[in-house]
Image (cartoon, grey):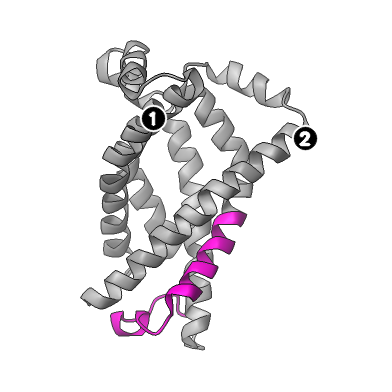
Amino acid sequence: GFPAVVSAGGPGNGVFYLVYEGCKDFTSPFVSSTIATCAATVIYAPMEAVKETAFVNRTSTMTALRETLSRGTGFRGLYRGWHLSVATWVPYLGLYFVLVERLLDLERGSGSGKLHQDNESKGEVSFLYNLRCGLGAAALAGIATYPLDVLKTRVQTGESFAEALGAFKQLGLRNIVNGMWLRVLWLAPSSALINSFFNQYYALLS
């Protein structure tokens, strides 16, 4: 599944930040991230479907792609569970960016309660502070959206929603906690690094 992540991760993130930055000057971080997430899942959803299928079935990316396509009518199979993908990533990224923007605003010392500052002020926040903010925000958002992520993953790998929901109910508290922390260990550093690097380069380009 790694080739699917490599080929689609960059374009998906590019679409997200392009839309997010275009919206954030006239609306809140949550609304901006919601619009950006809906746009980016056009790329994210097929990538996730192929990646998760490859992981679960332990097959190559090309085999997973063929299996994913066979579950729907052609390319419709790539968007299996798209509604759950949106339902998972909208609250995750919404909560993440609300927390990050607020923490960055506090570091800039605006004192006005405004969530956005001009481009010049972005350069005043260090990479390490960006990273710390991102790690904390991603951890909280990852924990909050873990149940939705389990359902999304199971539906994208071929189960019906009813089957996925039944399997989740049978996991048990210990398995849920273990899976939750694995999700945090994956999302916290990846989300924090992507956003920290983006903020630094955005400030330089500005």
Q: Residues within 10 Å of mark 2 (few under 14, many from 20)?
A: few
Q: Residue 63, percent across and down?
A: 34, 16
Residue in view at x 32 percent, y 20 percent: 65
| Up/down of 62 relative to 132, above or below | above
- The kind of residue on which mark 2 rests is Arg
Give the left or right position of residue 114, taking residue 11 as reference: right
Q: Residue 160, percent across and down?
A: 52, 16
Residue in view at x 54 percent, y 69 percent: 132
| Residue under pointer 2 | 174
Q: Residues within 10 Å of mark 1 (few under 14, many from 20)?
A: many
Kindly state the secondary structure of the residue where label 2 is placed: helix
Kindly state the secondary structure of the residue where label 1 is placed: loop
Residue 27 visible: no
Residue 189 visible: yes
- The kind of residue on which mark 1 rests is Gly
Please check the rendered image and state whether residue 24 is part of the magenta-colored stretch, yes or no: no
Quarter of the C terminus within the rendering:
bottom left
Q: Nearer the viewer, residue 142 or 19?
A: 142
Q: Nearer the viewer, residue 141 or 129?
A: 129
Q: Which mark is residue 35?
A: none
| Up/down of 84 relative to 196, above or below | above
| Residue under pointer 1 | 1
| Up/down of 137 relative to 117, above or below | above
Quarter of the N terminus within the rendering:
top left
Residue in view at x 58 percent, y 32 percent: 150
Q: Residue 200, percent across and down?
A: 34, 72
Q: Which range of residues does the magenta coloring cover? A: 114-140
Residue in view at x 66 percent, y 20 percent: 167
Please check the rendered image and state whether residue 125 is part of the magenta-colored stretch, yes or no: yes
**Distance Cα–Cα, label 2 vs label 1:** 27 Å
The image quadrant of residue 22 is bottom left
2 vs 1, front mark: 1
